[in-house]
Image (tube, rainbow, N blue to C red):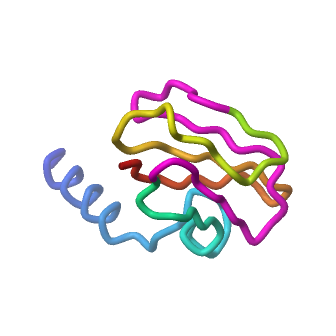
Amino acid sequence: MKQVLLFFFFISILTAPKVFCNGYDRPNDYVINVNPSPIRDRATVSCMYYIQKIEVFNLIGVIIGEYKGDETIDMTDQSKGYYIFKVYTPKGEFVKRVFKE
């Protein structure tokens, strides 16, 4: 009986309507734009809301940089790989994964 309940629990999770983690009705891809993609030296972050702060993390979760009031992120000293940009706005926090060449 427990196995049947667990099966239906996991099926309900997989088939549940998608709710975005930012609490809004649109995914992060429509809110945050990072150019160029992939990043070479510098990245420009644009957002449909005012950007208060941007934090850059590596995939381990270590914060690499914090930028306030700046939409240009210098990535020249960073190695090749994936990074997480966390953008703070008056409407909430939005997260975008980017790749650096």
Instruction: Please state the horizontal and vertical placement of residue 67, each as a whole percent of the image.
Output: 74, 39
Nearest to the observer: residue 44 or residue 94: 44
Number of labels in the image equals 0
Above or below, 61 against 39 in this view is: above
27 vs 45, left or right, is left
Instruction: Please state the horizontal and vertical placement of residue 34, each as a whole percent of the image.
Output: 57, 62
Nearest to the observer: residue 30 or residue 42: 42
33 vs 93, left or right, is left
34 vs 90, left or right, is left
Give the magenta part as a residue range.
Answer: 40-65
Residue furthest top in the image = 62
Instruction: Please state the horizontal and vertical placement of residue 10, each as a whole percent of the image.
Output: 26, 56
Q: Is residue 101 magenta?
A: no
Q: Is residue 45 magenta?
A: yes
- Residue drawn at point x = 67 percent, y = 68 percent: 24
| Quarter of the rendering containing residue 13 | bottom left
Above or below, 39 against 74 in this view is: below
Instruction: Please state the horizontal and vertical placement of residue 28, each as a whole percent of the image.
Output: 57, 65
Above or below, 31 against 45 in this view is: below
Nearest to the observer: residue 87 or residue 75: 75
- Residue drawn at point x = 64 percent, y = 59 percent: 44
- Residue drawn at point x = 57 percent, y = 27 percent: 63
